[in-house]
Amino acid sequence: MWRRRWLPASSSTGIRSRSAPATPGKLQDFLARHPGARAASFADAAKSGELVVLAVKGNVALEALKAAGAANLSGKPVIDATNPIADAPPQNGVLKFFTDLDRSLMEQLQSAFPDAHFVKAHNSVGNARMINPDFPGGAKPTMFICGNDDKAKAVVRGINDQFGWETADMGKVEAARAIEPLCMLWCIPGLTRNEWTHAFKLLHEA
Ligand SMILES: NC(=O)c1ccc[n+]([C@@H]2O[C@H](COP(=O)([O-])OP(=O)(O)OC[C@H]3O[C@@H](n4cnc5c(N)ncnc54)[C@H](OP(=O)(O)O)[C@@H]3O)[C@@H](O)[C@H]2O)c1
C-alpha cells in the first residue's frame, strides 16, 4: 500500500511483486505512474537491492523473506516496517497482536535470517507522513529504531534524516518488543476518532 510514497524519494528502482498479488491491477497502475519503477520477484528485488524494505502483512513476513532468499539478504540492511497485527478485530480501537511482549516479530525474523541486518523503523506512523512530514513550526517527529548492526542503523538514520525525521536508537533487536506496540498506540486515535495525522516525538530537557 505505501510503497508509492517511498519510490519518488528513493534512488532505488526496484519493487517486488508476488506472482499473484491480491490486486494485480494496482501494481500495473503503479508501474504506469512511476516510469522509473521496476517490478521484480522477491528474490530478484532482494538480490539487486543494496537495502531491503520489508513492508508486507506481518503474518506473512517470514514467508516473504523466505521467498527473497537468505543469501540475497545476507549482510544487507533490512528496514522492517511490519507489525504483528492479528486477524482478530481491534478491541475499543486497540489492535490485537499475534506476538507477546517477550518476543517481537523482528526477533523472530532476525533469528530466522541471522545474516541479515534488520532495523525496525517506519512501523508506527502512517504512510502519508513517512516522507517530509509537515508539523507545526517545522517540528521533526521521532522515528524509533532498533537492531543489532550499527552500520545498518547508521544507513537507516541517514534515510530518516533525508525523509525529515529525527532518529531515536533504542538499542538491539529486543527493543522491537517496545517499538512494535507503538503501532497499537498510533492507531487508537485513528480507529476510535478517525484521526490519522499525528506522529510521536521524544522530548529531552535542555
Ligand atoms: N499502511 C501504513 O500506513 C503502514 C504504516 C506503518 C507500517 N505499516 C506496516 O506495513 C506492512 C504493510 O502494510 P499495508 O498497509 O500495506 O497493508 P497489509 O494488509 O498489512 O499488507 C499488505 C501487503 O502484504 C502483502 N502480502 C499479503 N500476503 C502476502 C504473502 N502471502 N506473501 C507476500 N506478500 C503478501 C501484499 O502484497 P500484494 O500487494 O502482492 O497483495 C501487500 O503488499 C504491515 O506490516 C503494516 O503493519 C503500514
Image (tube, grey):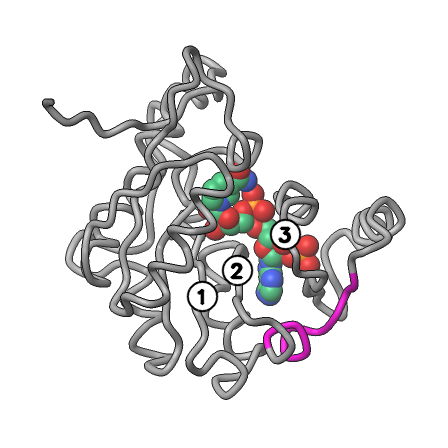
Q: Measured from the top left, where is residue 5 in percent x and y?
A: 64, 41
Contact, CB < 8 Å: mark 1 with mark 3? no
User: Furthest-right residue in view?
Assistant: 32
Q: Amino acid at mark 1?
A: Val
Q: Which residue is mark 2?
A: 53
**Callout 2 crowding tier (Cα within 10 Å): few <14, some 14–19, many ≥20:** many
* Quadrant (top left, top right, bottom left, bottom right) of the N terminus: top right
Residue 110 quadrant? bottom left
Q: What's the residue at 20%, 50% (across, down)?
A: 170
How far separated are the C-alphas under marks 1 and 2?
6 Å
SS at circle 3: loop
Q: What's the residue at 39%, 50% (across, down)?
A: 121
Earlier sequence position, callout 1 versus callout 2: 2
Earlier sequence position, callout 1 versus callout 3: 3
**Callout 3 crowding tier (Cα within 10 Å): few <14, some 14–19, many ≥20:** few
Q: Within 8 Å of ligand 1, the CB of disc 3?
A: no
**Callout 1 crowding tier (Cα within 10 Å): few <14, some 14–19, many ≥20:** many
Residue 167 colored in magenta in the image: no
Contact, CB < 8 Å: mark 1 with mark 2? yes
Earlier sequence position, callout 3 versus callout 2: 3
Q: Which residue is mark 1?
A: 78
Q: Measured from the top left, where is residue 30 in percent x and y?
A: 80, 48
Left or right: where does residue 153 sit relative to residue 26?
left
How far separated are the C-alphas under marks 1 and 3?
15 Å
Residue 175 quadrant? bottom left
* Quadrant (top left, top right, bottom left, bottom right) of the C terminus: top left
In this view, the residue in front, 176 or 130, is 130
What are the residue bounds of the magenta stretch? 38-46
Q: Measured from the top left, where is residue 26 in percent x and y?
A: 80, 48
Q: Which residue is mark 3?
A: 10
Q: What's the residue at 36%, 82% (across, down)?
A: 115
